[in-house]
Amino acid sequence: MGPTASGKSGLALAAAEQLPVEILNADSVQIYRGFDLGSAKPSAEERRRVPHHLLDVAEADDPWSAWRYAEAARRTAGECLARGRLPLFVGGSGLYFRAVEQGLSPIPPIPPEIITRIRDEGERWGWPALHQRLQTLDPESARRLTPNDGQRIGRALSVREATGQTLASWQEEQGAGLGMPLLKLAPDWPRDVLYARIEARLDQMMAEGFLEEVRRLWSLGYDPALPVMKAVGYRQLFQHVRGEIPLDRAVALAKQESRRYAKRQWTWLRREVGVVWFAGDRLDEGLERLVAFALEESPAPALEAPFADAEIP
């Protein structure tokens, strides 16, 4: 687990040299085909080295909810264990991790046009006005929220409109958790160092063709309101491709939003129970903890041989 550009993938690949792991993507953008450079998706060479799962499993216009991801992830993890491999989840989407660990309500995907319209109404009339609407449509959810909590008010209203059920009633249908021993491991960096890593990685993405990737995606005609089209980095470059802002401005905004996103990820993880942090520049410490946990707690039947020496299914 960890903020963007914190070194999660590097740790996972190092672990694959010592343990029989298969990597399960836990990044909400990497599940979509074509969103490669901007999401820092593992390269073809890295996928050859270690089996990866839950990459490129959906088109942009087939949005995945956290519940849908968790169902696929738990099934895939069980298949890994049945092969005697350890499922190693790698990514920065905190809600995905929580959904896998604890289970979520099976709320179906909400049409993007409903989400966009309710967001626009909140910005036009003010979220307290929509909070009053929510008091009528979903009083239990409204009691939990402050009148200015636009994100959660919008979520509750969109669920009510799209499904005919209140968010509170959906949340009573909690799915099952993973049900196996877990180690939640995260690299920690000083804030200024992490921000420098984020900016350097975005520069590298641009050098490798991120803008061309965005142009190709835009040419496919996807609805701009789709969730993945608004992912950090992509959203800003789409603005440039549409002719709204110059490229240097788009890149600067992408770096700014990436820093903000990393801060939100860091805040989320600090509130998570049981996260084990290690210094980001001490990959060996993180790897040592991971290997020790695997050998002591793993439900996989055999861990004697390193993955590099094992037959890849």
Image (spheres, rainbow, N blue to C red):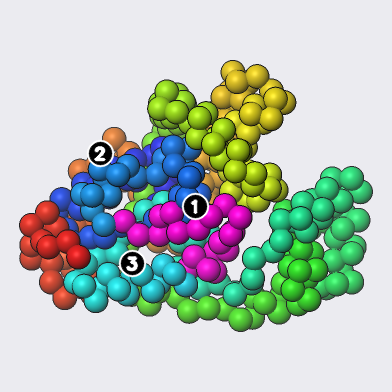
Mark 1 or mark 3: name the one nearer the start of the chain: 1
Label 2 SS: loop
Compute the Cα span from label 2 to label 3. Answer: 21 Å
Left or right: residue 230 versus residue 194 is right
Depicted 299 relative to depicted 222: above or below: below
Crowdedness of circle 3 by 10 Å Cα count: few (<14), some, many (20+)? some
Report the magenta residues as a range: 52-70
Specify the amino acid type for callout 2.
Answer: Arg
Q: Which residue is at a point 33% across and 67% down the rendered structure image?
A: 182
Toward the front, the furthest residue is: 220
Mark 2: few, some, or many residues within 10 Å (few <14, many ≥20)? few
Residue 191, given in percent of the width and then of the height, sits at 46, 32
* Quarter residue 294 falls in: bottom left
Q: Earlier in the sequence, mark 1 or mark 2?
A: 1
Q: How many marks?
A: 3
Q: Which residue is mark 2?
A: 282
Magenta run includes residue 51: no
What is the C-alpha distance between the residues marked 1 and 3? 26 Å
Q: Is residue 129 left or right of residue 16?
A: right
Point out the frontmost of discs 1 and 3.
1
Viewer-side residue, 113 vs 86: 113
Q: Characterize the local packing of mark 1: few (<14), some (14-19) or many (20 or more) Cα atoms within 10 angstroms.
A: many
- Residue 32 marker: 1
Name the residue at 51% across, 40% down: 262
Specify the amino acid type for callout 3. Leu
Report helix, strand or loop for mark 3. loop
Which SS class for mark 1? loop
Q: Residue at x 52, y 28 (%)?
A: 211
Q: Which mark is residue 182?
A: 3
Sequence order check, earlier mark of 2 and 3: 3
